[in-house]
Amino acid sequence: MIKIIASKTAEEAGIAAAEVIADIVKAKPNAVLGLATGSSPIGMYKELIARYEKGELSFKNVKTVNLDEYVGLSADHDQSYAYFMSTNLFDYIDIDKSNTNLPNGLAKDPAAEAARYDGVIASMGGVDIQVLGIGNNGHIGFNEPSDHFTYGTNLVDLTDSTIDANSRFFASRDLVPTQALTMGIGQIMAADKILLIALGKGKAEILEKSLFGPVTPNVPASVLRFFKGEVIVCADDEALSVIREKHPDAV
Ligand code: F6R
């Protein structure tokens, strides 16, 4: 079941998304959170930090598994996803960093690292909620459009469109890593709940395609329509614009 929470602005969507996570952490202090990086969840992380600072929330017993990491970047490289998680969330809350997990981008043998990460995810005994952004091409995690759905952690070649999109964070396009390790679609679909955050008009077309078009590995996010539980979509007005135009009754 897909539930769309519509917000006027990106800021409001971030607060709505934080509310979803906060409810889970309050109900289950040792929850396992599947986390994402990128611009979409930043507002949510800010709001979670604010609630922690007000004493409303504790992450002391929370465990996390992140979706993905660039191959070739160390955890202290300022564009690595490990660094992103520290500087956008972990450094500001009471989480035990030994309970936080990401693929190791510097692993010499990416296939062995993928297998290790599969073991980490399995050892969690289930992810209570998986946070996702959505790529302009419909990717979730770094599972790029393809002719098949992946199951486990896998090494991917990033598409030109993803490298273009992510080059905004690097000094130049050729510094953007070309490969990543990502949790597979099957692992994402194994979570108990999914929270997809989509912000801005750049996501409007692909969000409509994913939620209303055919389910196909060519649009990886479309697989969420087959999710067994609840998919909560927190989106702002701009990201919902094409859905509103084509499916006026949907939101
Ligand atoms: C990030 C991730 C990616 C992003 C997606 C959207 O961990 O797995 O799928 O969620 O590329 O990125 P933003 O939010 O920057 O538009």
Image (cartoon, rainbow, N blue to C red):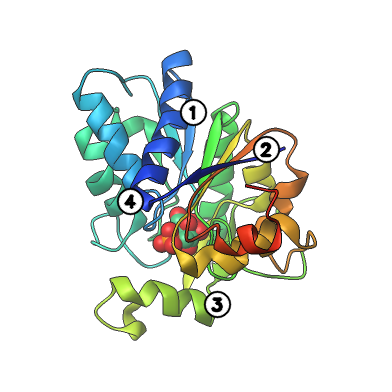
Q: CA distance from mark 4 to mark 2?
A: 23 Å
Q: CA distance from mark 2 to mark 3?
A: 25 Å
Q: Quadrant of residue 72?
A: bottom left
Residue type, label 4: Ala
Q: CB at mark 1 closer than 8 A to ligand 1?
A: no
Q: CB at mark 3 closer than 8 A to ligand 1?
A: no
Residue type, label 3: Thr
Residue type, label 2: Ala
Mark carried by residue 131: none
> Pointer 3: residues within 10 angstroms few (<14), some, or many (20+)?
some
Mark carried by residue 32: 1
- Choose the circle earlier in sequence order: 4 or 2: 4
> Pointer 2: residues within 10 angstroms few (<14), some, or many (20+)?
some
At a point 27% along the width and 53% down the height, the residue shown is 83
Residue type, label 1: Val
Q: Quadrant of residue 177?
A: bottom left
- Along the viewing direction, whichever of 97 and 2 lies nearer the viewer: 2
Q: Are marks 4 and 3 in contact (CB under 8 Å)?
A: no
- Choose the circle earlier in sequence order: 3 or 1: 1
Residue designated by label 4: 82
